[in-house]
Amino acid sequence: MHTKEPVNNLVTLFDSTVRVVDVHAIYAAAIFGIGVFLAWVLTFLERVNADNSHIPALDGLRGCCAFFVFIHHALFWRSYHSSGIWAIPESSFFVFLGKGSVIIFFMITGFLFFGKILRQPGLDWLNLYIGRFFRIFPLYIALILSVLVVLTLLGRGGWVGIRETLIPVLKWVLMLGAPDINGLKDTKLLTAGVTWTLTREWMFYFCLPALALLVWRQRSPVNLFTIFGIAFTLVLATRSSFDYYWGSFLIGMFFAWLRHKFGLMSWVNSRPAKWSVAMLPVILIVSFPNPYNGFAILGLGLFFGLIVMGARIAFLESAPMRLLGDLSYGIYLFHGIILFVLFGGLLKASTKPLENFHWLFIGCLVPILVIICYILHVYVELPGMAYAKVFAEKLKSARTSVMNALTRARI
């Protein structure tokens, strides 16, 4: 009786390891390698600004996460193309690539914007929201236009009525959901369903003034983080995927406060700490089937915290990874439509089994994805961010003129 238990435990461990380390994981690593190589090539065309972020590793981490979401959805399409079912991959490795990356994205957002509140009492909210608008919407509108072009090409019978088309499109534009457009079932598959995260981001941005009021009027940050601790405990207690994402924002905020209060911690850059950064994702993937678990979230938070508190990871700080970080928003938004064009369009009519060639097709898509996102970054993202400052100045100037005119009218 007792001798069987260790054997059963070993079998369970072996099965979980096989679920994690399968042949697709090897292909995924190769796909990621192609992306990093292309980013390295692009660094010769554009000098990467080392001052893009006060923590260069965050740029590289963003690049990793965006590319991992692309690989995650690439495996979705393998299943969908053969069975017609949009299903989560059985491999823990691929589940963590997608969901874990989104969780880290939210941690980054919580860290950066709560950090702004801590560093800048009296934050200029107008500048912040204008900056966010012109950072997010130009590329997002480009995505919606691309979706409409693809729908036009697919809708050989023409478009339905204006009312039936306009309302769903407006919901997409306003980030109020991703309803079907022009009668195409599961229109959101054109974007791999990623746009919901932008809604969560904006919800967090709209919470910032209330958070700032709480911070700026709170003399003791201990009291503040007692509130956060209670909130995080309630988040984990609900065991809802929606609430886990809010927990991710809270973890990012906690490390923003920790860094603001204590600065960089030298021990975090020690060899044991760096090994922890490398091993934590592996331990989490083997230990949990998906990251929607309180301990898994905390483990990802520890991984994130070690990086932002001072662990210098040369790979994440390298020029190719920082460039991928610059392209990360475009990769995140546009990988879905590029996958759809291939698998939902070009290869849809194929009667031959294509599973054996799936990763070859994905490898061929990588240069297309990276080049398109590079072009979008240069001609859409950067001009949008530059115009945000111009627009903010014009708005302030107009407001000053109106106030002066009102003052003169009263006199």
Image (cartoon, rainbow, N blue to C red):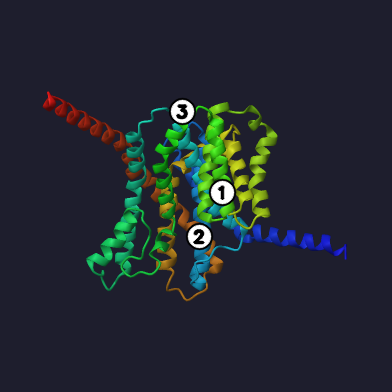
> Can you identify the residue that label 2 sits on?
74
- Between discs 3 and 1, the one toward the N terminus: 3
Task: Give me the disc on residue 161.
Answer: none
**Structural crowding at the residue carrying mark 1, measured as other residues with C-alpha within 10 Å and reported as few (<14), some (14–19) or many (≥20):** few
Q: As rendered, which of 232 and 372 lies closer to the eye?
A: 232
> Can you identify the residue that label 1 sits on?
234
Name the residue: 88% across, 62% down: 2
Q: Amino acid at mark 1?
A: Leu
Mark 3 and mark 2 residues within 8 Å of each other at the beta carbon: no
How far across and how far down the image is residue 386, in percent? 32, 36
- Between discs 3 and 2, the one toward the N terminus: 2
Q: Say left or right for 410 vs 185.
A: left
Which label lies toward us, 3 or 2?
Answer: 3
Q: Farthest top residue?
A: 411
Name the residue: 55% across, 36% down: 225
Name the residue: 51% across, 33% down: 55
Q: Say left or right for 311 vs 106.
A: right
How far across and how far down the image is residue 133, in percent? 33, 43
Quote the CA–CA distance across marks 3 and 1: 28 Å
- Between discs 2 and 1, the one toward the N terminus: 2
Q: Amino acid at mark 2?
A: Ala
Q: Is residue 45 visible?
A: no
Quote the CA–CA distance across marks 2 and 1: 34 Å
> Can you identify the residue that label 3 sits on?
119
Where, quadrant-wise, is the N terminus in this rendering?
A: bottom right
**Structural crowding at the residue carrying mark 3, measured as other residues with C-alpha within 10 Å and reported as few (<14), some (14–19) or many (≥20):** few
Name the residue: 33% across, 34% down: 127
Where, quadrant-wise, is the C terminus in this rendering?
A: top left
Q: Amino acid at mark 3?
A: Arg
